[in-house]
Image (tube, helix red, strand yellow):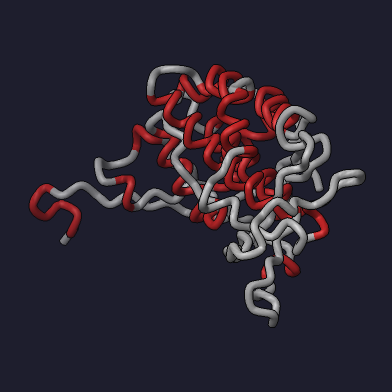
Amino acid sequence: MDLHMVAGRKPRATSLPHEHISPSDLPEDHEHILHVSRAHLEDCWKSHTQLPAPPLSQQGCTRLINDLYKCVLHNDVGTFPCSEIIAESPDISDCLPRSDLEGEATGTHESWAKQITVWCNTLLMCIWANPNASKLQITKKQLDDFYHQLMGNHIYKSSPLPPLRRIATSERRCWQQIRELVHQGFSLGESLAKMGNNSLFWQRELREHHPYNDAVDDTSDPDNTADGIAPNREWPPSRKRRRPLLLTHPSVGMGQITITGTA
């Protein structure tokens, strides 16, 4: 007896790891059972860039891919905190637990740089695998240019150099604003351009007080200083600082960023 025919039920969608399921083939409850084929996403990357697929250390983990893919199906980029942007094969050093010294932050500009690479590569693959998500269709160059602008002298390399916690938080908040703009009807390309040129947003995020990203000791991390730029010593000595943001998963750096598919 075919159990799928009982009570007129539709067969539950299943797929082998190498099979790709298009959105039109999925049942109404596909959001609960969707598993995206990584091989198909890599094929989309190769087709759009004419480059080899990024290594697993520069691709999102299965959970990130599935969650982001489901958002893209609805012309949405979603909201993903740093803690959810994890590589499929993260560096072993990035998987180590916190230092024995309680409260010591282990994140660096390099680890944050790797994390942004993971985000960008995964976002592009999910977008290109969904050509019907018309508002989100962008080129690799558009996303490269957006991050090059962020890493320039007017935003993240402005003087004095913002602390890493504030930089990482502002980048995620920027994507929240990009999501809002897309929701309002702008294309993703238009939204990237608007946020890259939104000087008031970056002034507020990087220079004005935020209780959750300003309470950081800039002197605790040597990566938060630059040649010729003294650490921020303007905090009142009696004010207790909160623990720095822990960035332990792969992320993109403070230099000129190019989102690549090679190590």
Residue 33 visible here? yes
| Residue nearer the viewer, 145 or 135 | 145
Q: Position of residue 176 (x, y in %)?
A: 48, 36
Using the rendered view, name the quadrant where residue 240 is placed.
bottom right
Q: Position of residue 131 (x, y in %)?
A: 49, 25
Q: Quadrant of the N terminus?
A: bottom left
Q: Residue at x 69, y 33 (%)?
A: 46
Does 11 sit left or right of 210 as displayed? left
Q: Residue at x 77, y 60 (%)?
A: 219
Residue 42 visible here? no
Task: Report the number of discs.
Answer: 0
| Residue 34, placed above or below residue 145 | below
Taking the view exactly as shown, the residue that stands out farthest to the bottom is 100
| Residue 153, placed above or below residue 27 | above
| Residue nearer the viewer, 212 or 230 | 230
Does 49 sit left or right of 31 as displayed? right
Q: Residue at x 63, y 47 (%)?
A: 166
Q: Position of residue 200 (x, y in %)?
A: 57, 25
Taking the view exactly as shown, the residue that stands out farthest to the right is 227
Q: Residue at x 37, y 52 (%)?
A: 14
| Residue 31, placed above or below residue 75 | below
Q: Position of residue 260 (x, y in %)?
A: 76, 38
| Residue nearer the viewer, 66 or 147 | 147
Taking the view exactly as shown, the residue that stands out farthest to the left is 7
